Amino acid sequence: VDSNHGADANPGTSPASAFATLAHASAQLDTAGGDTLSMKGSFKETLVLIGLNTQADAGRQTVVESTDPATPARIYGGTGLNASAFPYDCRGLPEGFGPGQGGYLTKGITVTNTNYITLRNVVIEGIAGLGILTWNTSHVAVLNVTVQWISNTAMEFHHGGPTKPSAPFMANLTVAGCTMRQMNLAKFTDRTRNPKLFSMKAEALSIIHVDGFHVHHNQLLNGMMEGIDFKVDFSVKGY
């Protein structure tokens, strides 16, 4: 998929015949897994991956990557890429913008109900929310990905089950060689305590109900809360 020279009417089988949009390209992925989505250019749209390799066949890995790792593809959410230009109100109160308003993306990449997925060599920035969110997805590798200038958590990996300790665990997560910087940038006003201004307070990397993970050789820069937050279940305090 090539944002500059592609067309969704193309077959999408080579760089010369690339699709133009992530939405169209992701809809062509084999739901049994095993395809590679190769990205080139800059995209102002969330990459949404749902229901790939639900049979958990280890031989059918889905890969999302940049066509040229030296010039990573970019998912850009539309916000300013400096602290003073970053929009303020991520809670939807009157002082600024709410999630999904003003043309800002609230997520860079979402992966749901999927197994054996690799995301590598892409840049996600300017997001009014989460950089990467996986939900009920196992056997995930995030490699050499940069997430920066976002209002909330850079990457969140969630088991997606019921909110109780007995919910199924997500299995096998690797996050390696990634850079997460300039997180928690949004500020908001609490109308019950107005006009005090609060900062978004979320971890850079959130790992919720995951059994078996490898997190190594990453850089976490300019965050305002924990670097990594491990949870058994977000609704069970002190479990």
Image (cartoon, rainbow, N blue to C red):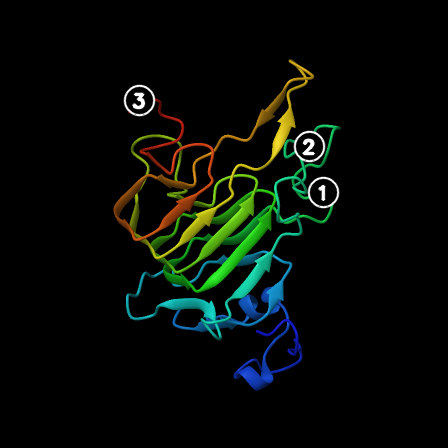
Determine which residue is flagged by label 3.
Answer: 238
User: Is there any visible trace of residue 32 in the rendered image?
Assistant: no
Q: Secondary structure at mark 3?
A: loop
Q: Quadrant of residue 231?
A: top left
Q: Residues within 10 Å of mark 3 (few under 14, many from 20)?
A: few
Residue position marked by numbered label 1 in the rendering: 101
Quote the CA–CA distance across marks 3 and 2.
Answer: 30 Å
Rendered view: 222 above or below 63: above
Counting residues from the start of the chain, the first of labels 3 and 1 encountered is 1
* Disc 2 to disc 1: CB gap under 8 Å: yes
- Rendered residue at 46%/52% (across/down): 112
As drawn, 6 above or below 89:
below
- Residue 196, x across and y down, in percent: 64, 18
Residue 131 in the image, given as x and y percentages of width and height: 51, 49
**Quadrant of the frame with the N terminus:** bottom right
Mark 2 or mark 1: whose residue is earlier in sequence: 2
Find residue 86 and report its image quarter. Answer: top right
- Image location (x, y in percent) of residue 124: 53, 55
- 131 shown above or below 201: below
Residue 45 placed where, x, y %?
63, 58
In this view, the residue in front, 51 or 64, is 64
The quadrant the C terminus occupies is top left
Residue at image point 44% right, 73% down: 36
The amino acid on which the numbered mark 3 sits, given as a three-letter code, is Gly
Q: Residue at x 72, y 49 (%)?
A: 103
Q: Which residue type carries mark 1?
A: Gln
Type of amino acid under label 2: Gly
Per the rendering, the mark at residue 92 is: 2
Residue drawn at 56 percent across, 62 percent down: 74
